[in-house]
Amino acid sequence: MTTLLFTHPVCLEHDTGFGHPECPARLTAILNVLRTSPFAALEWREAPAATLEQLTRIHPQTHVERLFAQVPKQGQYALDGDTILSPRSGEAARYSAGAACAAVDAILRREASNAFCAIRPPGHHAEPKQAMGFCLFANAALAAAHARAIHGLERVAIIDFDVHHGNGTQAALEHDPGYLYISTHQAYIYPGTGRREERGVGNIVNVPLLANSGSADLRHVWRQDIEPALREFQPQLILISAGFDAHYMDPLAELNFNEDDYAWLTQQILAIATEYCEGRVVSLLEGGYSLPALASSVAAHVRALMEAPKAAQRSLIKSILERQRAKRKAAGA
Amino acid sequence: MYEFLKYEVRDAMTPNPIAIGPDVKLREVEDLFESHDFNGVPVVDGERHLLGILTKFDLLKAFTLDSHLMVPHYEEIMEQTAEAVMTRNPVSVSPHLPLSRLLQKLVEMRTKSLPVVEDGRLTGIIAREDVLKALRRATLKHEIPVHADLPQ
């Protein structure tokens, strides 16, 4: 069982204009790293386009149609000060959402234990009726809804470690206790939501961090807030909104995570997934705007995903041996 | 030795300093900072009543990350007016304030300069450099004879 990598060439053609931080070069930097020999065991898959049925699980059809109608024939169209459409943006958004749903299908059909979707535009700011913050469709929420609708899951958890709060994912899922949404993000920056008091129907766990928080703070909130919430929820599938803009080199925020933190956090999530849902994890690319930091952080994240089955086997063998030892000891006593 | 205690703000300040109106754009303020060695510039109305002060920090603050947009729109922010980002009701001093007291105030407030106001109108600006210059002047007079006595 390996790790799947879902992507699509059209994701490189979503053109946000000269100098925009959410640029095609982000994806190029990631794919260049994932093509190197340490990642040879990754199984690359071409993402399909999301169907209208998949998109309308979260977004009203009128909104989806309006968004596609706003896609310009040439040049660029600004939905807001941050969010830019180019001629191929509608398609890129469709394939990004499609990647998320296809990855869920593959993992729940046990074709692999986990998957990473190298996609853009990102999704976690996209609300059901409002594209914003570089995001067009709510990829993570769509994947979660797909898992419930098609595969009959009852409990899907989303962990969002992008430096910005995923207002879109929260807005889409906050009324349904079948979803758990957990977000770490820097307080007081875009989009301004994600206060601790925003708890949905008890299924939203917001963990705002102050500027300059780093590795120690991440470990603290994992133990304090994230791990207990996950254990109580007992997820049948874990989705990750994997933004890497909390890295200390990122120009759009002021948190200080590093590559080791992303590897550590990924391992913690995988350990919970192994315990509750046979290691089933689907990770979706969100933000991350320093190209070198993005590439090295994704590498650390994907390396941890790929090592997960080995780590799980090691811990399985260890627990079997321990049980046998205990049995022998009991028999001898 | 006690020369410095005789000085008042007006003895060391820059009189009739360059000031700007409230409608001046940040781009022009930046030009002003570029061409002069100012820490901040007073903002006045047509009769030189002090409305505020715009420091380099006020200018930087206009460009910080906030919850409104993911990326600040740098060009648009440069087109904002001084009035939008200046510090209102700034601390000011009288030209007759003893310079020793002004020195205390600058250190306590960790500020680099203060506007000087008399009868509500801007008459000067006093900065760290002005106080340092006055200190040198006050102490130099005392030290000259000492150096003159040194053996060749």
Image (spheres, rainbow, N blue to C red):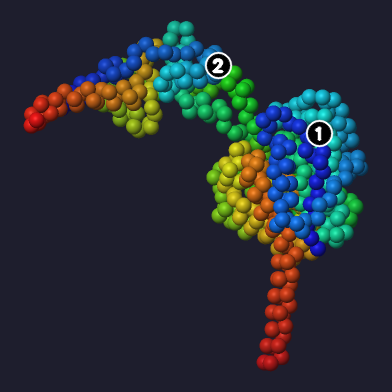
Residue A237, placed above or below residue B68: below
Residue at mark 2: B25
| Disc marking residue A89 | 1
Q: Which residue in the rendered view is the most extreme toward the top?
A: B47
Q: Amino acid at mark 1?
A: Ser
Residue at horizontal 90 percent and vertical 52 percent from the top: A150
* Residue A115 position by quadrant: bottom right
Q: Could you tell me residue A34's position as x and y percent? A: 73, 51
Q: Nearer the viewer, residue A258 or B11?
A: A258
Between the C-alphas of marks 2 and 1, the distance is 36 Å
Q: Nearer the viewer, residue A253 or B58?
A: A253
* Residue A307 position by quadrant: bottom right
Crowding around mark 2 (Cα neighbors within 10 Å: few <14, some 14 to 19, many 20+) is some
* Residue A326 position by quadrant: bottom right
Q: Are marks 2 and 1 in contact (CB under 8 Å)?
A: no
Q: Amino acid at mark 2?
A: Lys
- Classify mark 2: helix, strand or loop: loop
Instruction: Using residue A157 as the reference point, say whether residue B7 is left or right of it.
Output: left
- Residue A162 seen: no
- Residue B65 seen: yes
Instruction: Using residue A76 as the reference point, say whether residue B39 is left or right of it.
Output: left
Q: Could you tell me residue B146's position as x and y percent? A: 11, 29
Q: Which residue in the rendered view is the most extreme toward the front?
A: A37
Q: Could you tell me residue A296's position as x and y percent? A: 65, 49
Residue at horizontal 39 percent and vertical 29 percent from the top: B111
Crowding around mark 1 (Cα neighbors within 10 Å: few <14, some 14 to 19, many 20+) is many
